[in-house]
Amino acid sequence: MLSESSSFLKGVMLGSIFCALITMLGHIRIGHGNRMHHHEHHHLQAPNKEDILKISEDERMELSKSFRVYCIILVKPKDVSLWAAVKETWTKHCDKAEFFSSENVKVFESINMDTNDMWLMMRKAYKYAFDKYRDQYNWFFLARPTTFAIIENLKYFLLKKDPSQPFYLGHTIKSGDLEYVGMEGGIVLSIESMKRLNSLLSIPEKCPEQGGMIWKTSEDKQLAVCLKYAGVFAENAEDADGKDVFNTKSVGLSIKEAMTYHPNQVVEGCCSDMAVTFNGLTPNQMHVMMYGVYRLRAFGHIFNDALVFLPPNGSDND
């Protein structure tokens, strides 16, 4: 009995030591050590219409031309129907959009990343975009093929943000000590953040290619870890009423939840009027969104937007 009790106690002690060791290694890997400064993410808001109206018409036209957004869409062969829908719909409104695939796909033009690992795909896509387009675009938007984005609203949101500052924004999520932008709603990086990220990609101690020694870390968390080392922190994007503009769910699901939790304020409880993204859409829902956002108009109603973003040269957008 004494021998069995002794063995049991030894087992408990060894197990405790092992768990503590794993926890320490995990924290070292994630980069939550003392070198990191404590940071609470900011809540970034879109500009209000009154501020835009104070700008002269010539200045507004110059602003509309100066905002250039490069869109990165990470895809895999199984996403081919979503791929087609994204290509036919909202990506036409990007100043340039390119698809980065896990392998060579003959059906659609894409840049082959030659890996199935989403974090490696993301790293390679960011490096490719920075190396090739750093002098042409000042904002970089990354999304999954299940995401629908309204690029004009993104440009409006970014209107008063300086791309020479390290912006990293979208829908923020907190995981332990780490705050990160969830990929489901799309991720926006300024050119300064891209520059800082690119400088770390070759430093495995700060931006490792593998997410963890014991368990797999999602690609959006790994991006946050790398950016944190560069002094770039996740920031939540909101409208003037504090509503998220990067949505991790579809419009339909958001409305359904609003009807359940805010039955007397379905519209107010659902979504921002200046929403930038929705996620979890099927190919058919993409086309429905395209119709609702860009094509449906109320006869006799004149839209008086304070600022108009012109489509990129050669674009066949709606």
Image (cartoon, rainbow, N blue to C red):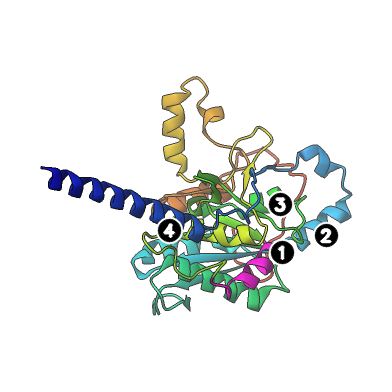
Observer-side mark, 4 or 2, equals 4
Return the residue at label 2. Answer: 62
Label 1 or label 2, whichever lies nearer to me, is 1
Query: Main structural element of the magenta stretch: helix, strand or loop?
Result: helix
Badge 1: how crowded within 10 Å, few (<14), some, or many (20+)?
many
Looking at marks 1 and 4 on the same chain, the residue that comes earlier in the sequence is marked by 1
Q: Amino acid at mark 2?
A: Glu
Pointer 4 or 2: first along the chain: 2
Q: Amino acid at mark 4?
A: Thr
Report if the CB atoms under discs 3 and 4 are less than 8 Å apart: no
| Residue that numbered label 3 is attached to | 158
Q: Residues within 10 Å of mark 2 (few under 14, many from 20)?
A: few
Q: Is residue 117 above or below residue 300?
A: below
**Residue 90 pos. (x, y %):** 54, 58
Cα distance in 3D space between marks 4 and 2: 42 Å
The residue nearer to you, when weighing 234 against 107, is 234
In the image, what residue occupies the spot 44% across and 27% down? 259
Which label sits in the foreground, 3 or 4? 4
The residue under label 1 is 192
* Residue 282, image x, y percentages: 39, 53
